[in-house]
Image (cartoon, grey):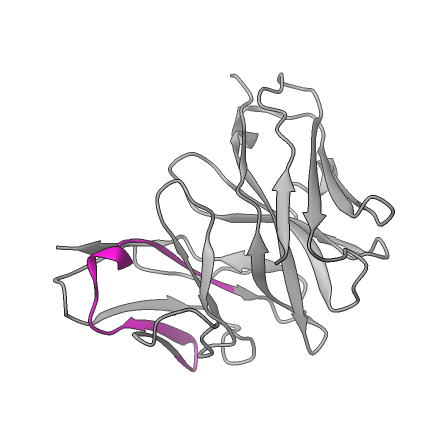
């Protein structure tokens, strides 16, 4: 059974860089039929796709964060990572990592999710 | 950016049918996916590719799509179905993911 587990940075100071890692077990990140993604959810609000990365390093970012975002994959450690620079209070959210299936070359759905980790940026 | 739109809330009595809609300009060309999120939990997919139900999801959950609108239908709603439901799709290029704002299902 595939499992994803986010690291837990907790509190990040304004203007600093948020770093998260998602460790994958029960499956390999080195698959051509999936991307690996981050989704966030501000407290009391809806879901927002942050970005996705393939095992070869191809990335797609939400334009709302693209200028500050870097996603990467480490196939040797079977994990993928997020770096979001210059954070503000608006980046406070539960961050989920997830596996994103492909269908016909298009993004499809998120079929496995991590439990989520709360990242707080104080105002 | 591409957006899909859902009603903020739906309320039904136990045993009734709940219908949650999702609207978007690209829906005639792109699939819709539906997630259930209960309080304090990660979302879980309940319908994929408009109308397919993953294994383990009860038969009372069904999906359909026509034109620019998709619908999640929950027949014979149970108290355990209460939670937030999100539709998800992608843009015409297929590499920008969008979620609807979420619909809170209340079982009266």
* Residue situated furthest bottom in the rendering: B66
Q: Position of residue B47 (x, y in %)?
A: 44, 71
Task: Classify residue A69 by image quadrant.
Answer: top right
The percent coordinates of residue A76 (x first, y second) are 87, 46
Q: Is residue B1 visible?
A: no
Q: Is residue A51 left or right of residue A120?
A: right
**Which residue is nearer to you in this view: A93 or A101?**
A101
Instruction: Reply yes or no: does residue B87 show up in magenta.
Output: yes
In the rendered image, the vertical position of residue B8 relative to residue B60, given as above or below:
above
Please give the name of the residue rendered at 62% of the width and 42% of the height, measured from the top-left corner. Answer: A5
Q: Residue at x 48, y 72 (%)?
A: B54
Q: Is residue B63 magenta?
A: no
Left or right, B104 with reference to B31:
left
Residue at image location 46% in from the left, 57% down from the top: B44
Q: Main secondary structure of the magenta part?
A: strand
Q: Is residue A19 above or below residue A38?
A: above
- Image point 52% across, 29% down: which residue? A92
Q: Which residues are magenta?
A: B64-88
Position of residue A101 relative to residue A38, above or below, is: below
- Please state, as top left, top right, bottom left or bottom right, where the N terminus of chain A lies in the image: bottom right
- On the image, which quarter does residue B108 sit in? bottom left
Q: Position of residue A114 (x, y in %)?
A: 57, 46
Across and down, in percent, residue B104 comes to 29, 52
Q: Looking at the image, how many numbered discs can be counted on the residues?
A: 0
Q: Is residue A39 visible?
A: yes
């Amino acid at each position: 059974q595939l499992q994803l587990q986010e690291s837990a940075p907790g509190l990040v100071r304004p203007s600093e860089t948020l770093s998260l890692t998602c460790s994958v077990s029960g499956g390999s990140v080195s698959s051509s039929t999936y991307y690996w993604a981050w989704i966030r959810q501000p407290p009391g609000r809806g879901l927002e796709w942050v970005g996705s990365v393939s095992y070869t390093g191809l990335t797609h970012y939400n334009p709302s964060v693209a200028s500050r975002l870097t996603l990467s994959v480490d196939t040797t450690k079977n994990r993928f990572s997020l770096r979001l620079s210059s954070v503000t209070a608006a980046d406070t959210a539960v961050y989920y990592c997830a596996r994103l299936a492909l269908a016909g070359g298009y993004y499809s759905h998120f079929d496995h999710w991590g439990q989520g980790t709360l990242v707080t940026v104080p105002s | 950016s591409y957006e899909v739109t859902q009603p903020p809330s739906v309320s039904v009595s136990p045993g009734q049918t709940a219908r949650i809609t999702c609207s978007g300009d690209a829906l005639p060309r792109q699939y819709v996916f539906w997630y259930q999120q209960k309080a304090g939990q990660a979302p879980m997919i309940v319908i994929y590719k408009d109308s397919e139900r993953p294994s383990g999801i009860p038969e009372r959950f069904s999906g359909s799509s026509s034109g620019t609108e998709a619908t999640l239908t929950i027949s014979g709603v149970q108290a355990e179905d209460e939670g937030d439901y999100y539709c998800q799709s992608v843009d015409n290029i297929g590499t920008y993911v969008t979620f609807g704002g979420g619909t809170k299902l209340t079982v009266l």
